Amino acid sequence: MNNSHQEIWNNCLKVIKDNVPSISFRTWFEPIIPLKIENNILTIQVPSPFFYEYLEEQYIEILRKTLRKELGQDAKLEYNIVMENNIFSNKPYTIKLPAKNRSDLRNLPVSVPLETEETPIKNPFVIPGIKKLHIDSRLNTDYSFNNFIEGECNRLARSAGYAVGNKPGKTAFNPLLIYGESGLGKTHLAQAIGIHSKEKFPELTVLYVNANKFQTQFVESIRNNNKNDFLHFYQMIDVLILDDVQEFAGKEKTQNTFFHIFNHLHQSGKQLILTSDKPPVELQGIEQRLLSRFKWGLNADLQSPDYETRMAILQKKAYNDGIELPEEVLEYIATHITNNVRELEGALISLLAQSTLNKKEITLELARQMIDKLIKNTRREISIDYIQKIVCDYFNIPIDLVQSTTRKREIVQARQVAMFFSKSLTKSSLATIGSRIGGKDHATVLHSCKTVNNLIDTDKHFRLQIDEIEKKLKV
């Protein structure tokens, strides 16, 4: 290996920077100092044990993948942890405990093997006669009811979820569809129901799966000619939790398969729990027969937390982390971070990191500096609907024409531009973008993006138009 440790780390940072939010990159990666590389072991210096623990909890996967790319499959990472401005020079202590058990850390440098493979989802397709007992529920134990703060914003959904957990499949709330914007706790609440059900009824088979994972498994089952095994596996589940059901938009075969699974489970008295970013009435690209079934039980929404709930969330988070914070600091965060729970908890973690890095006491002034910077650097999330509005306003075209089937050149071009920006500025799938812009499929979206990119390269006037629209979108 001829490359220096600094060069290898810089190459890793280039990849990491493209895959984590900018504020997280500045907080958790810029302070890291590469020290040396020996025998495919890269040693990095981190400012504190807290810093090390957070890196291993949140970012070990991307560190593992980037280092493997640079050093090969036998890459290892070693941490040197700074304690009171001194680096321990003892022989590195190799942790061979589970990731969350760090009782033997002892403030020593830590060598963390990176060759451990990701734990795969139990594969139902290659295990004939699979027994229910061996199915991994894929539930995160941190997402319990005890850690879910109740408030006016979520009381109905939480109460219904608790009732379902007590009697899965035996209440009127089947299916239970929990909907709301990103970061409000849909996944947490859905998994809390699964955890509660499993605790009360250990014999039940509970499974949490994201809609994208379900889609991937379905495609694999078709490719491997074992679709029946796929159906059989999901029809065995007693409590099925399907997250982000809106991702099924435009995927007709997947919807058809889930329709049959839904019917079988519902008729068998099994419990279905679904989450979505919108209520069924606003979901586009989903078949009507599925939407009607989503309405059979209860649709419960999660709203942005009010001030009292935000305070309770912060107090609970600080208590769980064993940290005492001044009340005025909690009040400042709760007053200025109002959108969702994820941002609220992220702000608290960033504040703790800043305090640790700079060895400063957590004060109102430190909180004010950090929160103001966080708010300034947080970009407003851009939606497909907002992009369509800006594009249509720019070209002076009514939105209903873009949504229509007309093939007029100016309408087609506006539609293509809207698809182009939706792909580059949102996290929506191609199928979702197509269904929201004129009811098109993912192939049309790909073709539109390619057409716009070609015009940008060859038509100076068109390129200027794209630049102007982009400025309006990012205002």
Image (cartoon, grey):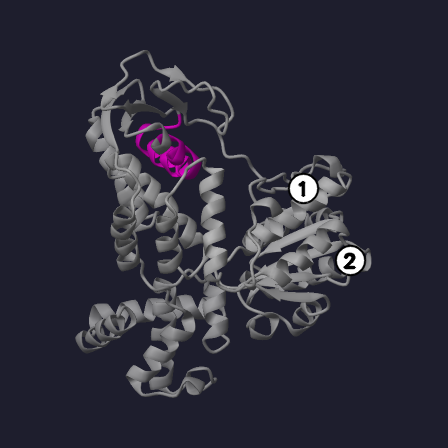
Name the residue type under label 1. Answer: Pro
Magenta region: which residues?
52-73
Task: Where is residue 315? Give x, y as percent.
Answer: 46, 46
Q: Quadrant of the N terminus?
A: top left
**Residue situated furthest top in the rendering:** 91
In the picture of the structure, the residue carrying the numbered disc 2 is 264
* Helix, strand or loop under label 2: helix
In the picture of the structure, the residue carrying the numbered disc 1 is 124
Name the residue type under label 2. Answer: His
Judged left or right of residue 236, residue 252 is left
Q: Is residue 108 above or below residue 366?
A: above
Q: Residue at x 54, y 34 (%)?
A: 119
Q: Is residue 75 above or below residue 162?
A: above
Q: Is residue 197 magenta?
A: no
- Among the 4 quarters of the image, the one containing residue 129: top right
Q: Residue at x 77, y 63 (%)?
A: 172
Q: Quadrant of the C terminus?
A: bottom left
**Mark toward the start of the polypeptide (1 vs 2):** 1
Q: Is residue 218 visible?
A: no
Task: Where is residue 175? Give x, y as percent.
Answer: 71, 61
